[in-house]
Amino acid sequence: MMQDLSRFVQPGRVHRQIYTDPAIFELEMQRIFGVAWIYVGHESQVKQPGDYVRSFIGRKPVVLVRDEEGQIRVIHNQCAHRGSMVVANDKGNAGEFQCCYHGWTYHLDGRLKAVPLQHGYPRDFDPKNPRTAMVQAPRVASYRGFVFASEAPDGPSLEDFLGYMTTSLDDMVDRAPEGEIEAAGGVFRHAYDGNWKLYLENLCDAAHPWFTHRSSIDAAQRQSDDAFSDGSGEIAIRQMRQNGAPYSFWESQVGIWTYPNGHSYLGDYHDDAKLVAALKDPLFRQYIAALEGKKGKQETRRILEVRRWNSNVYPNLSFMSQFQQLRVVHPLAVDRTVVCTYNFRLKGAPEQLFRNTISFANTVNGTGSLVLTDDLEIYNRIGMGLSSAGAEWIEVGRGLQSDLPDAHGGRRGANSTSEIYIRNMLDAWLRYMSNGRAQSALQ
Ligand code: FES
Ligand SMILES: [Fe+2]
């Protein structure tokens, strides 16, 4: 079966097995998560030497840590003695890492530091032998503070891997008057009983809000504008109302763009008055003044004219630069996935802007959100649907005949309802899974 993965992916359709087969999932962990650049965290989460956060490369637990010299490392969170996970706290500051089973102690770069009862080990036991260390990821690189790691010792550089998607990460950072962002406000974690691929497939799906989020659209449309005259609930209500924009809007006003390696972004679907760049809003005026003060009028205009909704960096990252949200996908099993959402503060911006970021997160990413819970229900239903034999093929052909080349080396949908972004991810999937040998099957 594994010799011929291309039979699972055909123009405009994909076999359900790639979402349900444990053997394919195992191969994905090796050939996709074991090779690609995987987002592991942000430099602002490890500001000081000794700061660390736990993360994952695929299913592999890792620690993102700033060592004594200030260098950022990603080390496998596994003790070289009998294999226990060493770091159990989600984050913290430490001078060293100590395994709580037999007390082996490690330097912040993973080298072994001390071993209780060392005299009891064989005479050739050498604590300096790399085999006794917590293993470092072979490649770690940052792009403007976003830290990625790759388990492959060689391959494309992080910037080559990201390609044009660097502009979405730039957008996230450029919006900070002081040119820096910091992760703040904790993390939302949610899990669903479905395959990891479903998450990114949903985040740029312009055709689903009208149906999936109907209940919150209806409730928001019933609210009068007076309901948020004091500012409370405004972001939530506006967001939910806009999810109910008619198809004619999605087909004329919003675009979808895709790039090599499975990446994509959806155009913004809010205008000035509705949500993000609320240009007439006093708070936003204050923010613009701060931005202009640091960057000048022309650069400020350029920055604010970049309007993107979700940007997806395949295989595990989705972020929303205008509202400084970032979600990381952690596959646990073929039918179980965890997603963590982080919020970022724009340095130099009014503090209320960060509060809006949190409000937005509560609206769309929080576990009590009236929007996210709809999507979780969908993932669970897809998981249930696909795991039963019946229709063997999934249709992802919407827009296939009308996809267009993009000016920056990618391809785009004729409008935002094209499923081109799914075909683009499946194209990357097939290339990774065939060790780069596959021809493009989909475009
Ligand atoms: S397993 Fe870590 S010290 Fe024994
Ligand atoms: Fe949704």
Image: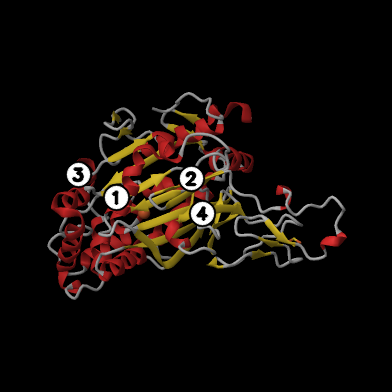
Q: Where's residue 15, x and y in %? A: 51, 35
Type of amino acid at the residue the image marks with label 1: Asp
Q: Which residue is mark 3?
A: 253
Tell me which label, 3 or 4, sits earlier in the chain: 4
Type of amino acid at the residue the image marks with label 4: Ile
**Furthest residue to the bottom?**
230
Left/right of residue 222 with respect to residue 37 in the rendered view: left
Q: Residue at x 30, y 58 (%)?
A: 323
Q: Residue at x 58, y 67 (%)?
A: 94
Tell me which label, 1 or 2, sits earlier in the chain: 1
Q: Which residue is mark 2?
A: 197
Q: Secondary structure at mark 2?
A: helix
Type of amino acid at the residue the image marks with label 2: Lys
Please say if 221 is above or below 257.
below
Tell me which label, 1 or 3, sits earlier in the chain: 1
Please say if 89 is above or below 414.
below
Q: Which residue is mark 4?
A: 72
Q: Where's residue 406, x and y in %? A: 28, 31
Q: Residues within 10 Å of mark 2 (few under 14, many from 20)?
A: many
Type of amino acid at the residue the image marks with label 3: Gln
Q: Which residue is mark 1?
A: 171
CA–CA distance in space, label 1 to label 2? 25 Å
